[in-house]
Structure formats: structure tokens, C-alpha cells
Amino acid sequence: MVATWLWMWAGTAHAYVDEACADWAAAGPPEDYNEQAQQDYLANYFALTTTFSPVHAPVPHEGGHGSIGLDVGILPPVGCPHRLVLNYTKTEDTNKSPVVPRPSVSYSFPTLGRTTMYAGAAYVPPVTLFGVTNVILSGELGVGVALGEVLQLGGRFHATSMKTVGEIATPFVEGGTAFDDLYVASTFGLDLMVGTDFDVVTPYLALGWTDASTFFYIGDDNVVTNNYHPYFGFTGSLGVDALVADHLRLGGEFYAAPGGYSQPVKDLENVSPASRYGHLYTGRFRIALEL
């Protein structure tokens, strides 16, 4: 799922450029292009693709019930302006998988008054796909309150840890020797939620703040590339949660991470705004068996 990005290699001769990005490369980089900003964007982008957003209502189940199912996150392809590196002389192979699937479980503890606490988790075991092996572990803890017959309010904490091993930094020359690399990312955040329970369907809105950290080790030359501007900023979800025929749980949401505030570890000239260091707009879905 997480694919390839910046490889800091001295020199630019004979670098491979994807035909789809040939026109962009020929036009050259924009005036505010910066190699470090390009690397930080890609590092943050793939961390954001695996954040554990709710895909459920503020009260995900009746007390004492839960679900087991599958979450599927859409992974939008990275465009040429961010795939081109080394001063627009080389493209990175970032678009290997269009989705991020992961099995998930959720459980709501017995309701106390109008308050329901819940927990959820998702896990991707070490499966090799498209030449890389990914492990993803996510979890959430939350509380929802039913106010009246319709209105729901809630809050949740979420966290994700992911690791990818494989050919992440592609060879400088197409067809060159490939080495395994290591990409590690972690995210965590807090959300406030509001929803309206219309029996079968519950539309909801989640607004929160998320932090991302990344680590990237390049296997061919034992170099660690630093993320000088890790994502730290707003995230939001707008979606619907539905229980069909008492046993089929369906959910879908639009997820946004428009760009975060980052206290620069390394000042970069002519690089703005903060979304230059990573942003994501995507859809996420859940299908589950209600227990």
C-alpha cells in the first residue's frame, strides 16, 4: 500500500521519468520547489492514509453489542507534482494500490444511563502485496451520549502504528538493483462527534486534531531520511452509519486532513502553505456483521 518516494542520490543523469509525468518534468519545477518539502509531503501523506477515523456514529452500537467486519480506505493516487523529485528529474512509483483494506472489530460496553463507552481495533497482518510487506495496527476508545431520541454526542481517542518493508525507494535507474527499505509511521488524535439517529441511518460529523510521525530507512546505502515537518493539525469526517436488518452494519465517510501546523525543525525558503507538507482528502467505508 505504501509505495515509493524520495531517494536522495547524488547526480541526476539518466534518471527515470514516468511517461505520464514527462510534460511536468519538461516544464521544470515550480519556483517554490524544495527537495525536503517534497520528501516531507510524501512521508506525511502515507501516514495519513492509515489514520483510524471513526466510520461510525457517536454511539456505534447499542450497549452490549459489537461488530466484526472490514474497513476499506481509498488511497488517492499521488499526482506528478509530488511524484517528481531530484529537481523534477526523477519520478517515484507511489501508486501501487488504490485501497487500504483492514479487518476491524468494535464493541460497545453496557450503557449507563444515556452514556455508552466503546472500543475498537483494526489489524493488517504481515502480508506481502505489490512487493512490499505491511503491518498496520489501529485502536480507538470512545464515549457516546444519547440526548433525547435523536441527538448523539461523543468523543474518541484513536491511534495507529504501521510498518512497511520492501522496495520503497526505487533504484535511481530503471531496472537497477533493488534493496528492501523500512518505512514506519504512527498517528494519534482526538475527535469530537455529533450525530442524528434516524433509527436505521445515523448521519454524523467528527472534528479533531491528529499528529503523525514517520521514520524512513533506505536499505541500499543505510541512510535515514528525516521528516522535518510532521503533520500536526485538523482532521474531519462527514459520514453515515447504518444498521440494516439488525445484522448488517454499513458505514461510509468523507475524510479530510487539509494540512497541519508544523513548527519547522528546518526552515525552508519559499515553501507555503502548511498543506505543502502533506494533506489528504478521501473516502472510507465499512461493512460488518452486527453481533
Image: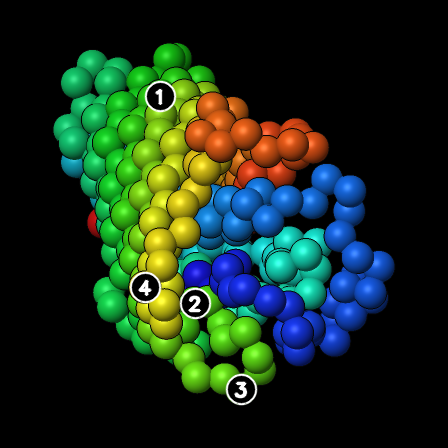
Amino acid type, callout 3 = Gly
Q: Mark 4: few, some, or many residues within 10 Å (few <14, many ≥20)?
A: few
Residue highlighted by disc 2: 168
Distance CA(mark 3)–CA(mark 4) = 20 Å
Q: Is disc 4 placed on a helix, strand or loop? A: loop
Tag on residue 154? 1
Indicate the amino acid at tag 2.
Ile
Percent position (x, y) of residue 280? 57, 43
**Residue carrying label 3:** 175
Q: Earlier in the sequence, mark 4 or mark 1?
A: 1
**C-alpha separation, residue under disc 4 versus residue under disc 1:** 45 Å
Dot 1 falls on a residue whose secondary structure is strand
Image coordinates of residue 15 in percent, x first then y, are: 64, 74
* Secondary-structure class at tag 3: loop
Q: Which residue is drawn at the image coordinates 41% and 21% (left, top)?
A: 192
> Viewed as shown, does residue 145 lie left or right of 13?
left
